[in-house]
Every structure is written in C-alpha cells, then in structure tokens.
Image (spheres, coloured by chain):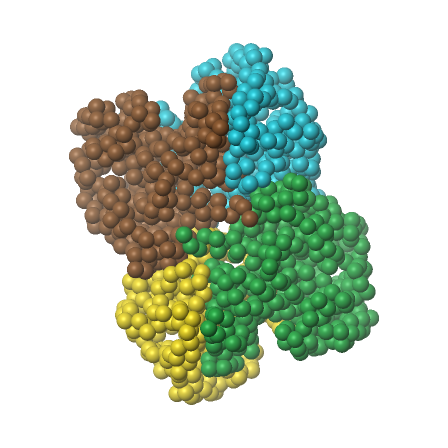
Chain colours: A brown, B cyan, C green, D yellow
C-alpha cells in the first residue's frame, strides 16, 4: 500500500520525479458540478514556483498545469481529474556528481536502502518538486470549500519571530512581500536575514502559521481520524517539516486546566480558543490555527562531507540553485494540504447523520 | 469512512463507549505464527489502568482483556483477533447531571452537533477509556517487533522539565515511580507538583518523550505516508494531544543548515541525529525520538460555567474521579501507538523490493 | 491488508472461528439517528441459524447477538457498533479426528499452507458460521435502506429449477416453507430432493435468485467499483459460491444487441430489463436481479479419501451434523450481503454532486 | 471514495474520457527492481486497440503509452508510475447528435442522473476506452508475476461454443486468428458469425474463458477478499460483463457433493479440479479457470428509439465505428485484470506469516 495517495473521499494520488518527464496526479472523488477557476489554480502554482523572487531558488520552471480529464465545459464531471506538469528543467547531467553519493540529511541513503535502486537526479521522488501536484489539488479543494478562509504565513525565520497573534494581522498583506509575512516590518527583517544566510552559502529554518476560518462545525472522524490528527499528518508529510502544533500546542502542556478551558458563549462559540477550533477531534466552528516547523534546507553551497555507496566519506559541494529558506514557498503548500484535509472531511461529514 | 480503524496492513479497529457494556476491538492483519505472551499484554493494560497510584484517577476498572478469536494454542493464526474489555464501572446515573450540558473544552458539544445524538455517559466514545484497546493492540505489535525497543517517559509536567537528553537516561527507571519519569529527583518534583494541583481541584498538562531504538532501516512510505507523518497522526489521535515534534522539532526551525545536517559515518550511521532517525520519511537506522504535548485535563473539581443544550450558561462542577495530569497514564498509550505504526510499516516494507 | 472488512463507508469487520469463544464484528460508518428494530435483527439471524428445519444441519446454536456499543436509547450514535454472538457449540473434541487431516474440497489444506498454522476445529475461520455476523450487519443495513425491498429465494436445487420469472412470484411465500422457494409446488419437490440426498449421506448444490426493488437511481462508483461488480464480489465472498450473474447474465452472452437493448419509456424507465437495473455500473431505478450458484457442501456422511499432513491418503467420514444443501440457509446471507452493498453505495452516492 | 482505483498493494488508478486529451493512470505499489519489457507492454495494448482486424471497430487509435515516472534505467524504482495514452481520435463533433440523447442500454442516462452533468462525447468516462489503462498496468503485473501463465480466449460467440475443455487447447494458437479462439475450425465459424452480424448492423455477445497456471499456493484473503471474489469483481468491472463463474461454476450448482469433491493426490494436488484452483478463497496450486459473459454491444448501426433529456422518445442511429462483438478485444483486458489481481494478492500474501 504505497503512500502516494492522500484523502479518503476527496483523494489525490501523485507521481513524478524531480527530473523525469513530468510530474502529475489524479484527483478522484471531487463532486460533480464544480465550476473551476483555472487562473486561481495556476496562481497557486505560481506562488510555489521557483524563481519568483530573489530569496528563493533561481531555477526556472514554468510549472504550468495541464488537465487531461474529469472536466467538461469548465465543470467537474465527477470522474477523475488527471493532470500533468512538465519538467522543463530536466537535465540529468547536473546530477552525475551525486550518482554514487549520499548527501547528508537528504533522503538519498534511505531511498537506496529501502528500494535498492534510486533515481539520483535532483533527489528523484524525494524532491519537494512533488508538492506542486499538491498545490494543484489543493487549489481545487479551496474552490470546493467556498466560504472557508485559509491563510498561512511565515511566522518565523530562524530565531526571528512574528510575535503578533494572528488576530492582529491583515492577511491581505501576506502576498505583498517575498517572504510572505503579513507584517511589513518583520517581513523586511526576515528578508534581510535570508539574504545574509544565502550569502554565506547556508540555509535557515522557520515556521509557518496557518489559520482556517469559517470551517463548518462537525468535521472530524474520531477516534483515529480526528481533524487535527489528519491536519498534522498532512503537514508532516510536507518535505522538511519537523513539528506540528495546534491551538495552545506545546505551550498548552505547561498550563493548568483552569487556565486552558475555553468557556462557552450562549451561541456555542467560546470566549477563548486555546482548543484551536477542535474539540474531541471535531471542529467546533471557532478558528482553527496551527503552526508547522520547517528545518533548514539540507543542500548548502558549502563544502560538506558526504558518504559514497562504497562506504567512503567524500567531500562534496552543493551546486545548482537551492532555496536558502524553504518557508516562503511552503506557504501555498501548507494551505493546499489544509484545503485537501478540509475538503475530504467535509465530504466525510455528509455521512454522519441519517 | 468512519475513523475507528488504524493501520493499513496491521490494522486495529476499536469500538466502545466509556459507560457501555464493553469496549473492544479487532486486530486484523497480524501475521500467523506469533506466540503471544498474554501476561505482557495485561501488564501494558495495568500500566494504563485507573487507580494504579495516588496521582491518577481513583476509578476502579480491572481492565481485563478477553480474546475471542484469532489465536490457537497461544499462537496467532493469521485470522482477525477479536477482543473485549468489560466496563466494570458503568453506572450511568453518575452522569445524569451532564445529560443536557456541554462541558467546556470537552467533546460534548461537537459530538452533539456532528451526530445529532449523544451518549452523554462519561463522555461516551470521546472518553479516553477507548485507548485501552489501543494498548492491547500495541502490546501485540510490540511482540511482533521483537528487537525494537520502545521507551516513552514523562519529560515535563507543567513548567517542570526533565532537562537531560534521552541518551543520559536509564529507561529501566521509568516504571519505578508513579509519574513515569526515569530520573528519581525530577520524578519526585513532578509527583509533588501533581499532588499540589490535585489538591486545588485543578489539572495540569505535560509532555511525553518517546524513543524508538533498533528500528530497521527502510520503514516509511513516501510521499504522504512518511514514517514521521504517521507517527504524528498516531500521537495526535490520542486524547488531549496538542502537538508533535520529532528530531530537532521546533528547535530545528531556528537552526542553520550547517548546524542541522547530520554528517555520515562510514557505516551509514550519522555523527549527530537532529533528523531523529528519519530521512525523507524513511527510517535510517538511527534512534527515532519524538515529543508529544498533552493539554491539561478539562474536567476540574471546581465550579465552572458550562452551556446547556437550550443555550443557557449553567454552573457545573466535575464530580467523580478524574486524572489531575494525564501524562503518567499516557506513557503506555504513546508506546502502543508507536508500536502500531512500526508494526504496520514493517509489514508495508515487505513489498518495497522484488 | 487482511480481508476481514467489507464496505467503504458502511463498513463491517468480522472476527471469529467456528469453535472459538465467540464470533462478532464491528459496524463502522452507520449514520447516527437510526432507530433500531432489534427483533428484526434477531429474526434475520434465526432465518440463518442451524436446526431451524429438518432439511438443515441439526446443530444447536441459539445465535443470539449482543450489541456492546454504538447504540444509545435504541438509536445509532454514529460510533462503531461492536457485537458478539457466543458459540454455544464449541466442543473441540469433535474435531480431533481432523487435526492432521485435510478434508477434500475444504479449506483445510489452503489455510495450512497460507498461514502455516490452523485452527482445525470445525473449519475454524473458514466455517460458514462467520456469515452470522454478516447477517447482523445486513439486518441493520436493511433498516437503513428503508424503502428498498430485498428478496432472495431458492431458484434451484440440483437440476430442479423454479422456472417462473421473479415477476410472477409472491415473495411473501418464501418464508412459508423450509427450502425458501416462493412456489408451493416446486418447494415441495425441492424439499423432497434434499431429503433424499440427505438420506444418501450426500449433499447437493443450488442457486439463489435475489431481487432488489426501489433502489434509488445513481448507485455505483465506476469504473472499478461498479454496483454489479461489488454485488458480485459480495456474493462470491459467501462460502460455497461458484458463480454470479445479473440481468441477462450468461444468457445475454448468446444474444444480439437488437434483442438485448432495453428501450426507454418517457419517464426514464425501460420497457424490458435485460440490463438488470444497472447501466454502466450505476443503478437506473429498474429492478436489480441476480443469480448466485452454490456448490454442494463438501462434508459428506460417507467415507471419503482425505490427505494427512504427512502426505498420506487416509480414509475419513464426516461426522457431526452438516447441511445437505446450503441454499435454504444461504437466503438471508445473500440478502444481507446485498443490503450491505446497497447501504454502502447509498452513502457513497452522497458525495457525487456538489 | 470514488471508484477509479483497483488493488490494495499493487494499485492502479485510472483517469480519462473517450474524447478528452488523454487517458492514463498511476500504478502505485509495484516493488522496486523490476526490469520492464516495454515492447511487451505495447504489445498488450496492440492486442486491445481498435482497427486491428476486420471484425473489430475500424477507429484509428495508435494507443501508444508514455511513462512519465517511476522508472529509471528501465527498472521500477518503487515510486509511482504515471502514464498517459493520448487520444488521437478526439473529434467531439461526431457526438453532438447525442448531446441531449440517452442511448438505450448505455450509461448516458445513469451518468447524467448520478452526476448531474455529462461528458457526452463518445460515452465519456463510461467508454471502454478506459480499459487501455488496465491493459498497461496488467502488462506490468504480468511481468511481476513471471512464472504464472495467464491465458484467456474466446470460448463462445452468440450460441457458437468452443466445446473443448481448456486442457485440450493449444494456447499458442489464440493469437493466430482475429477472434482469439485457440481452435482453428471454431475460430473460422466465429469470425463468419461476427461478419454476418456486422453486415446486419447488429452486434452479438460472447464469453471469455481464462486460465491461470502456476499460481503459487496461498493467494487469497478471506473472508471477504477471497481470491475468486476479487477476480469476479475485476471481471465484472469490465464494460459489458454480465456474469462470472469459476471452476464448476453454475454447473456445480447442479451437482452432488460426492461428484463435486476434488480428491487429493499425495503431493497435495487434486485428481479433479472442479474447485477451479481455489479452496476457501485461497489458491491451492491447481489451475484457476473462470468464464466471463459479455453482453452484445449496445450501439447498433440500425435505427433505434432513444430518450432525450426532455423526456421525448427520439429515433437515432449509431454512426461511427463500433465493435460488432466485444469479445476479441476483451481477451487482453480479461488477462490484464487477472494479472492485476494476482500481482496484488501475491504482495498481500507476503504478510501472511511471520
């Protein structure tokens, strides 16, 4: 049961390697009758694509999605939507120097051990290029979700944090700067930090905060498929993610019950929201918010020791064009995965009652 | 596709409410030929059961598991193992006072909204009593995993942290104290803290750290079913969990790539292990370690405002016998869920190669 | 991914061996709010149970189902329904004579080869006793389906056929005779035939016809999960089944298109119904009808050669009390499996449109 | 949970409409290290493609498969294999005459009712064109299965039957004639019959027999996912199939146990094989054989009454180029589906024992 599918009813299956002919996927289970906005889909891809600013990788990939099925006269038909994104940048020669080399903190070693064979070109299947397919499906999920608002943003780069709570932010500012932080001042600082790191040939981690608003009450399938458990899995499946917390998160573990409980208003909303919009694994209508930790990108433009397949330590240096910080391009990916979870769980909830 | 099953090949499905006749489950997909140690299974249940010490709930539940099928002459037969745990403590009268009341930060409200009907007795399905079934299945998974060592322990209670890294701990001490912290001094402090909180009629959160050793290389099913993504989902599905991080976790998000990368030794092991034993979603043979955040229990032995189903704010006070801190009893649950993931992924890995 | 679950959204997982402590199952995914008629459930079990007439096995099993969860005040709550049926008749000594023996045309040999271990008592998991759990779940599915009418009946025993088309039958007569054939005259002949076969210590095959009426238009999930494909799988999963055909079936393969096409009426119904109520894998609102072939029971009350586990041919004779013809007791099982498919597909269809 | 995936571990998901840009699919779960024979894959597609002889449709489709991922240096890498087959023949204008018309015994009506929207061009998703993707995946499954021999052939056209049992046939002759019947004399008669039918503008049904040899003992996952149940579902999911029987099939339902039981040889093989190679849902090492009934193609080159979406009966006549008998082109599809089941179940059986 290979792990290239996500979702139960609204299901995405992806394929493709970084330097193969194309990447792509199949979205199966989208209800019929959804009128698609193709510009909105491509726009999400553009938010993720390389070369969009001077703080991300300068690789060139147009990342144009082509739909092959499941849509008729701009409307979903209920049949599976196949799509492909051609790999423009598929020169495998760039990667011959890593053919026999396992780069540190990459997936080279583990893929080789697991499968006994490896497409070493640009990380092959383990490349984050695959996430473009998630962005396509997520963009459709967003359209299916209509009134739900999904806003992710960069909440830290290294030790530089956006301290304001999300309630004090203007999400319309997120796309106004290259680091996708909806606070002008902090955004400038983050950009400066990433540029400095890049100059050193180094990379830096960061966190993404994501806020889901207008989520219907009742989404979540206890006891194992709780809404936050699936959101957590979705986020942890994104390349470079090391942690996930929602609502009060790790801070909540330091609190007392008398501080942490969210008291009700008469309409069922709560006065506070340390629960993060989910009780017992089911959405309660309050804002859902969570935070995702991304490690620094492993490819450095510095000399590093690596291991070759014969068991020798060899010196290597990342060439090519890599992201100094993955977070700005991760924003649309986090949103896409959140949308996929919500769309799937909204369909699942159709089965809850008679 | 209701969410009461966990695992793909080694699959657990559970049923049961806190105050119904019994809880139980079916384990489907355990390979045939495993000789079961029933004492070890019951021992895991005893680690989770109420009343085991003076810092946990004083409810009385023998929590004796009875297997109904799938085992012949103490050996698994490859057919599904049905099991039940009777509910000794099923007096529904204790709960009549919450029949029409949604307790704050409980699942009462969301279950009612989702399903339109609710078994209000003791939280019904949303009660953590259900996790006893996970412990049963996890105990069998542990036996299947043989050489893999799974050790969870209490790493914080409120703001009191066990600062030592896991490498400096003696896991054989975990079971020597009631809070399950493998450091005598810190354990005493934690126990004192929980007793103080209990005296106040309050509750407190905490964290559990879990270490998986001798895990075979190659477990994990990219791109969505990465090993850490499934571990994260498993942990987040446990009642009261608010966060999950593995390896460097949220700290890793503050680091630079040159600090974070784990350089190889010639045998494929790594000099450091900020990756937490997983690269690209696949185990690399190093220790896997992760941390799980638990919020404070929502039931207080204090007066609190609640909401009734007619939309009135009403005062209520938790009666009965609740845990002042969920973490000590969560240790075997965390271990059980980790074992379920590893057992499942070990089976999945059987199909990776020809 | 062991095969003890059936259904995608309305899902049944079963456990239990013929001579273990109990058989049982979990129904997960039944929508909340269904008021259950427990007498109707037990009545379906009674239709299947041994000893109900003199043409079936004379084993004594009360086959009383006990529900353990998922129901509150007679209503489904949306949480999983666990249930057990105790095995009254679990004397394993009766079966010591087959401990080392593979009976011809039983599953003894294949289970032993597949799993390397075998619960030989009464066929263990391969016994048709397991189908009692299907009947329980099917009875609930029937209640969920409300207006849908499901009628199975014995359409042949050996070479004795009920020639009348189903339209000419009065289904209310099915339960008036022990062979469950809704035609008095043919029923008498069938009963006589089975009695004669029984006297010879032999067994005989037969067919069941099943008619599903008032099925909503739109059930079926092409291209693989077509409604008739799932019905076929459901029927073929019943013990002793060798074939399945729906609508024109094997006869249709002899016909010309100009004879076989079902022309429309103006209301979308069709003048003929060789399609059997399903077009392109989706129900069209016409009656669905299909036929299921059952082989003769393999256990004879005659001497037969068998194989022992050391590779010797040994003579054996079936003792105990076996069905001379499985078909009369198979009627409620066929209906149950049909109900499970329809309930599941009715839920699946909820996600077809926006 | 839309139904466009087949298989549990070796999983195929397909997409594509008859007259869209392309059809295609993703094969997920093929073990790494399989060296692929691409000519063999294309050869299977050629056996299915239109225009290959004068008794099949004269549409022109090159049906060339392009693999996009999952293969490196001709070897499977364990990652998903995406593939596409372009639709050469995608002129939608041919189909404007059926835009508002439901053709009798087609899926036009049911798709429209189920989804509320319909790609009417050439049947859209309900077209058998989709089966080309199954043939691609099946060809890879065949290569994975190595020693297993899979041979399907035309066993009847209308009322003209190949009476010889499969043991008396030379399967190498199947591909020597256009009707794919491994008996020269009967093949000639069948071809003549189809030509006569075609001349009438009519169509005719038929049956396919399929024989699986050298299947390992132990494949099958009781109680629901019995090997023959999955084979049955696989076959019933093919367009135009109305019935499935294996081993003794419907004839077995007429027999007595003393005639039907397969007695053992000392090596575990059986003297007869009415069981059809499967006992209790698990392969026993004997030949598996089954028969599949195909109805006559619904599109006639004759005038027929149809229904329009406003509820009027309208006269229509199939234009275009349709198969007078679907069976010759169905042979590779039946084989492909059988191969998919066996490959999947061979992987599943890896989990049976410790």
Q: Residue at x 32, y 34 (%)?
A: A152
Q: From the viewer's perspective, is residue A220 above or below residue A68?
A: above
Q: Residue at x 30, y 57 (%)?
A: A74
Residue D348 at what x, y percent from top left?
52, 52
- For this view, does C30 lie left or right of residue D170? right
Pick whichever, B299 or A133, lies toward us: B299
Pick whichever, B225 or A225, lies toward us: A225
Q: From the viewer's perspective, is residue A205 above or below residue B145?
A: above
Q: From the viewer's perspective, is residue B304 above or below residue D274?
A: above
Pick whichever, B1 or C109, lies toward us: B1
Q: From the viewer's perspective, is residue B74 above or below residue B99?
A: below
Q: Residue at x 46, y 38 (%)?
A: A217
Q: Residue at x 63, y 16 (%)?
A: B54
Q: Is residue C195 visible?
A: yes
Residue D296 at what x, y percent from top left?
47, 77
Q: Quadrant of residue D108?
A: bottom left
- For this view, does A171 lie left or right of residue B60? left
Q: How many marks?
A: 0
Residue A247 at what x, y percent from top left?
42, 28
- For this view, does C88 lie left or right of residue C78? right
Q: Quadrant of residue C60?
A: bottom right
Pick whichever, D62 or B257, lies toward us: D62
Q: Is residue B230 visible?
A: no
Residue B208 at what x, y percent from top left?
49, 24
- For this view, does A234 lie left or right of residue D255? left
């Amino acid at each position: 049961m290979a792990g290239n599918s996500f979702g139960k009813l609204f299901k995405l299956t992806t394929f493709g390697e970084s330097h193969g002919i194309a990447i792509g996927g199949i979205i199966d289970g989208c209800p019929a009758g959804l009128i698609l906005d193709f510009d909105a889909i491509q726009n999400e891809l553009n938010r993720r694509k390389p070369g969009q600013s001077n703080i991300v990788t300068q690789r060139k990939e147009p990342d144009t999605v082509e739909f092959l099925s499941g849509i008729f006269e701009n409307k979903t038909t209920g049949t599976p939507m196949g799509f492909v994104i051609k790999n423009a940048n598929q020169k495998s020669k760039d990667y011959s120097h890593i053919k026999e080399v396992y780069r540190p903190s990459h997936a080279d070693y583990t893929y080789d051990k697991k499968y006994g064979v490896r497409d070493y070109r640009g990380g092959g299947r383990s490349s984050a290029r695959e996430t473009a397919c998630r962005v396509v499906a997520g963009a459709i999920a967003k359209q299916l979700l209509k009134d739900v608002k999904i806003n992710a943003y960069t909440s830290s780069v290294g030790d530089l944090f956006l301290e304001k709570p999300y309630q004090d932010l203007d999400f319309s500012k997120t796309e106004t700067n290259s680091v996708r932080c909806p606070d002008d001042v902090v955004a400038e600082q983050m950009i400066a930090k990433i540029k400095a790191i890049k100059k050193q040939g180094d990379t830096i981690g960061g966190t993404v905060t994501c806020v889901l608003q207008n989520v219907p009450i009742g989404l979540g399938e206890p006891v194992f498929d709780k809404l936050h458990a699936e959101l957590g899995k979705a986020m942890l499946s994104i390349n470079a993610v090391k942690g996930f917390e929602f609502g009060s998160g790790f801070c909540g573990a330091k609190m007392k019950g008398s501080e942490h409980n969210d008291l009700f208003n008469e309409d069922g909303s709560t006065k506070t929201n340390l629960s993060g919009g989910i009780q017992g694994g089911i959405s309660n209508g309050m804002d859902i918010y969570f935070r995702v930790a991304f490690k620094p990108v492993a490819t450095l433009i510095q000399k590093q020791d690596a291991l070759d397949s014969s068991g020798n330590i060899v010196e290597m240096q990342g060439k090519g064009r890599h992201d100094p910080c993955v977070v700005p391009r991760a924003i649309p990916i986090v949103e896409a995965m959140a949308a996929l979870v919500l769309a799937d769980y909204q369909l699942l909830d159709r089965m809850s009652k008679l």
